[in-house]
Amino acid sequence: MTQDEIRVRFAPSPTGPFHIGGARSALFNWLLARKMGGKLILRIEDTDLERSTKESEENIKEALKWLGMTWDEGIDIGGEYGPYRQTERLDIYQKYTEELLAKGLAYHCYCTDEELEKDRQQQMANGETPHYLGRCSHLTKESEAKFIAEGRKPTVRFRVPPNQQIVFTDLVRGTVSFESNGVGDFVIVKSDGIPVYNYAVVIDDALMKMTHVIRAEEHLSNTPRQLLIYDALGFKRPEFGHISLILGKDRTKMSKRHGATSVQQYRDLGYLPEALVNFLALLGWSPVGEQEIFSLEELIQAFSMDRVAKNPAVFDVDKLNYINATYIKQASPECVLELALPHLQAAGYVDGTLTAEKRAWLMEVMTAVKEHLSYGAQVVDHVDIFFNEDVQFESEEAAEVLRDEDASQVIEVFKEKMAALETVDAASVKKVLKSIVKELKLGGKKVYMPLRVAMTGKMHGPDLDHIIPIIGREKVMARINATMAKM
């Protein structure tokens, strides 16, 4: 590793579905690494033993791969600074804990949860910010022996130096300052010997040579504790950048009530990974100019930390749908079919293994409807016209179209011309429709609308020159005859 190589990390806790906010943090780190020719390290912070699961870890890795974010070092790949799971690094943390204890920079704390809670309640009653009062900070050997004899299992607390300004320059927020007196001596190792997040993360970042730590704004309050540990252990501080929170459209913190919150949910709904990445990049980062649709390569070239905003980012699902719809319009029929297939199967339109003939026909359907899709799950709302032979009027207004005085003539002329066609394809159907408009001297709507309603029951949908060849001449004729018989 060269001294000036950019090294960033994404270090999730595998404690549930991969949240969209985590994906945005991973993306900003990945973009910075790719832009600067650096490396992204994937590390798993699994010291929350009760909540961490292998399933969640696999979900995170799969989601990152699906989004196109590869890592250069870490779990599954290895590297010279491993291991890359915190539970496999406990001996490393122990070594530094002993060093801090030996130097008097940390101490054993035997306070019980009940004692700490009592202190906290009293401080809150006094209008004070709760912090540790330091009752174990200068224990005599006799007091310590007494607590051990009682069977108390100690935590290890970091000794916070008094009356210090903890200052750093944040890449997003500028100069940030904290008072050490407001921090209080904090736990770095729990009574079960497992290090807490704020302690382990510093040792990992330092030993893995991280140059930049780009993470969510909610970690800003952790930074003073971490900086104190960096300094106490003689580690070089990385550069920090705290990116804004993601809010719902009502400007409250994004949650399930705003809709899907995990990457997997958007994947299941039929969003394209490149569209989701494009959208996530614009959550808290603004490019130069008005461009909104970016390829991955364009994002890498355009990205810079100095254009990351301090203000919260608003998760606007309408904008996501606009971006995804743009990508779907540009996608191949094969790609759109892959997005749509699970939803077609769930709706009962498709079952079993697709024959080559059925797949080819479905791709024609996708070509017809993709202009109307914002995401794959919506396909169910647009394809019934290709599958349901029994035409039902969607409204009384639709039925009224066929009672128009010109409707019967339009339909009769259409049937004659369709019967005479040698080949039924988009070009020939378009020619037939134009000729009817010309011959009957009617506006396009007077021709297209009754034909659409007669064969689909709907007043809107894909172009007729797309629909008719897909449904097929015989079925189109049968549908129209059956519909007109109802009238």
Image: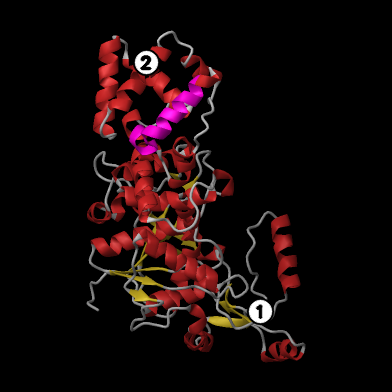
Residue topped by disc 1 = 136
SS label for mark 2: helix
Q: Is residue 234 left or right of residue 141?
A: left
Q: Is residue 316 visible?
A: no
Stretch in magenta:
468-484
Kindly identify the amino acid type of the residue bearing the numbered disc 2.
Val
Badge 1: how crowded within 10 Å, few (<14), some, or many (20+)? some
Give the residue at x 53% y 32%: 390
Kindly identify the amino acid type of the residue bearing the numbered disc 1.
Cys
Q: Identify the image quadrant of the N terminus.
A: bottom left
Q: Quadrant of residue 150?
A: bottom right
Badge 2: how crowded within 10 Å, few (<14), some, or many (20+)? many
Q: Main secondary structure of the magenta part?
A: helix
Work out whether residue 223 or residue 419 is closer to the camera in this orientation and state it.
Answer: 419
Q: Position of residue 312 (x, y in %)?
A: 44, 46
Q: Is residue 368 visible?
A: yes
Residue topped by disc 2 = 410
Q: Is residue 330 magenta?
A: no
